[in-house]
Amino acid sequence: MTDTDPSLYRGRFAPSPTGRLHVGSLVAALGSWLLARHHGGEWLIRVEDLDPPREVAGAAQVQLDTLAALGMVSDRPVVWQSTRHDLYADALARLLADGHAFECRCSRSDLAAAGGIHRACMATDPARRPAIRLRVPDGTEVSFDDGLQGVVVQRVDREVGDVVLRRADGFWAYQLAVVVDDAGQAVTDVVRGADLLDSTPRQILLQQALGLRTPRYLHLPLIVDADGTKLSKSIASLPIDHDAPLPALRTAWQALGQAATALDGITAVKAAMQVAQREFAPECLPKVTSLAFAAAHNNAAAGAV
Ligand code: GLU
């Protein structure tokens, strides 16, 4: 079996080291891990450390430790995006050479009148350091069949515009790095949170421009507060305790639509993960993009075993 054998299932979890893992991020980690195991495939971890201003020192290692405390360890050496600049530079050079990408000196305020969506350069400061964007032709529509959410269609030209690949400050854009790395690591199945659902069409466009295979995508629901807002204020946003990760595991398990009773009475993490792997039913994954879940976590946090 080679690295590019399409019959192989290879999933991944790709956290940004902006803080500790919480139940919300654990849903994506656990979901991708369970699906990879269910399919007899590999599961990889990639640290997306390309945005130093947003990073918290030491957070990546703490995230890896939290995953390890739950028995989720990368099947191959962890990939750190900060060591892969040459690969992103090569991809960008190809896109520029092929005419798929262009330099753009527009600032945010230049684009404000167009709602921030770039269709044509309107730069007012020719001396500004350029960003590089992917040209998205008029009428570009991308659709894909999400493994959970069904068919997603996006008019990328109107809804997103020309996609930033390298920012004016010199940092690589997530969209370029994720496409280069998913292909470079021969990921067959991208399983992640539904907050990235609307990024997928532009990633598919980039894959097409670079001549790369498009993986399968599956977007898991995001945990939100009871009032439907982002989970920042909810108990689900509390960091996972390394020494006692079971409550968080139970909450993530239930958020994935799995029978809470399967983990009843289990007090050891290793045993819980073994049962989770055995009992996981992908058909029960909730076909929604968000899930209000604070109450259930309260139960779990109260020690319901
Ligand atoms: N690094 C991204 C995040 O933490 C996830 C990227 C992905 O899964 O494609 O939100």
Image (cartoon, rainbow, N blue to C red):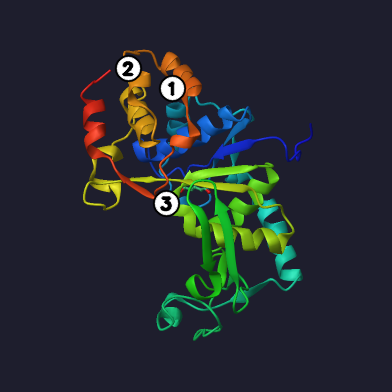
Label 3 vs label 1, nearer the camera = 1
Locate residue 222, reporting x and y percent: 37, 46
- Going by the numbered disc 3, the residue's amino acid type is Arg
> Mark 3: few, some, or many residues within 10 Å (few <14, many ≥20)?
few
Residue at image location 36% in from the left, 40% down from the top: 24
Q: Describe the element under mark 2 as helix, strand or loop.
A: loop
Front residue of this view, candidates 142 and 119 = 142
Residue at the spot 76% in from the left edge and 38% down from the top edge = 5
Q: Of discs 1 and 2, which sits in the foreground?
A: 2
User: Which residue was labeled with disc 2?
Assistant: 264
All told, the count of numbered labels is: 3
Judged left or right of residue 8, residue 31 is left
The answer to whether one can see residue 171 in this image is no
Task: Tell me the number on the disc at residue 69.
Answer: 1
Mark 1 burial class by Cα count in 10 Å: few <14, some 14-19, many 20+ = some
Identify the amino acid type marked 1. Ala
Image quarter of residue 101: bottom right
Task: Say whether mark 1 is within 8 Å of ligand 1.
Answer: no
- Residue 276 horizontal/vertical position (percent): 45, 23
Query: Foreground residue, 55 or 114?
Result: 114
Question: Marks 3 and 2, Cα distance to the nearest angstrom?
Answer: 38 Å
Residue 58 falls in image quadrant: top left
Contact check, label 1 and label 2, Cβ < 8 Å: no
Q: Which mark is residue 54?
A: 3
- Distance from Cα at disc 3 to Cα at disc 1: 25 Å
Q: First in sequence: mark 3 or mark 1? A: 3
Sequence order check: which comes first, mark 3 or mark 2? 3
Q: Earlier in the sequence, mark 1 or mark 2?
A: 1
Which amino acid type is marked by label 2?
Answer: Asp
